[in-house]
């Protein structure tokens, strides 16, 4: 059985997108075709953990909000019932580092790319670019789609 590791497109930067879940749907479609499993990885981080200063944080509140956003993303990607071969992982840390680590032992890493205008569509985001450069397996970067079977 194959394993496909991917992040749902669920960080705050994707908030408001009308096409949430494209990478998840693409990965699930691919996993069905090859008899694999999808490991949905939601990575969240607290900027102050990396040395940024800002308002005081409540780690428990951050974790609860990450759980809620992850659940929302999964529900948006799979309205109704979630696929049986979907495994969910909530990870705290740097998104690109966590995904690169998750690529070890995976057959495929599927990441989403947010689009913000004509120039941005031509560029990969920083997380997807780092994953494409450093992952231990092939990487698929999924843009906004109208047909998840593509």
Image: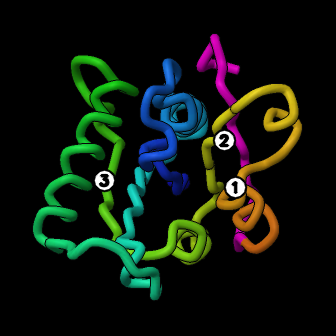
What colour scheme governs how the chains and residues are painted in the rendered image of this protein? rainbow
The residue range painted magenta reads 135-150
Which secondary structure lies at badge 3?
Answer: strand
User: Are there few (<14), some (14-19), or many (20+) residues within 10 Å of tag 1?
Assistant: many
Measured Cα–Cα span from mark 2 to mark 3: 20 Å
Q: Is residue 44 magenta?
A: no
Label for residue 88?
3
Magenta span includes 143: yes
Question: Which numbered tag is attached to residue 39?
Answer: none
The residue closer to the viewer here, 20 or 82, is 20
Identify the residue at horizontal 63%, vertical 56% (top origin): 109
Label 2: how many residues lie within 10 Å, few (<14), some (14-19) or many (20+)?
many
Q: Nearer the viewer, mark 2 or mark 3?
A: 2
Residue tagged 2? 113
Q: Nearer the viewer, residue 108 or 62?
A: 62
**Going 52% across and 52% down the picture, which residue do you hit?**
6
Q: Is residue 37 visible?
A: no
């Amino acid at each position: 059985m194959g394993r496909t590791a991917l992040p749902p497109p669920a960080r705050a930067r994707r908030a408001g997108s009308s096409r949430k879940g494209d990478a998840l749907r693409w990965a699930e479609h691919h996993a069905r075709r090859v008899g694999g499993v999808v490991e949905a990885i939601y990575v969240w981080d607290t900027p102050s953990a990396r040395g940024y200063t800002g308002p005081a944080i409540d780690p428990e509140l951050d974790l609860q909000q990450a759980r809620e956003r992850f659940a929302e993303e999964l529900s948006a990607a799979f309205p109704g019932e979630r696929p049986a071969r979907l495994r969910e992982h909530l990870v705290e840390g740097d998104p690109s580092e966590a995904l690169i680590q998750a690529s070890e032992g995976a057959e495929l890493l599927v990441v989403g790319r947010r689009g913000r205008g004509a120039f941005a569509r031509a560029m990969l985001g920083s997380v997807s670019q780092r994953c494409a450069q450093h992952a231990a397996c092939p990487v698929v970067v999924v843009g906004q789609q109208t047909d998840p079977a593509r």
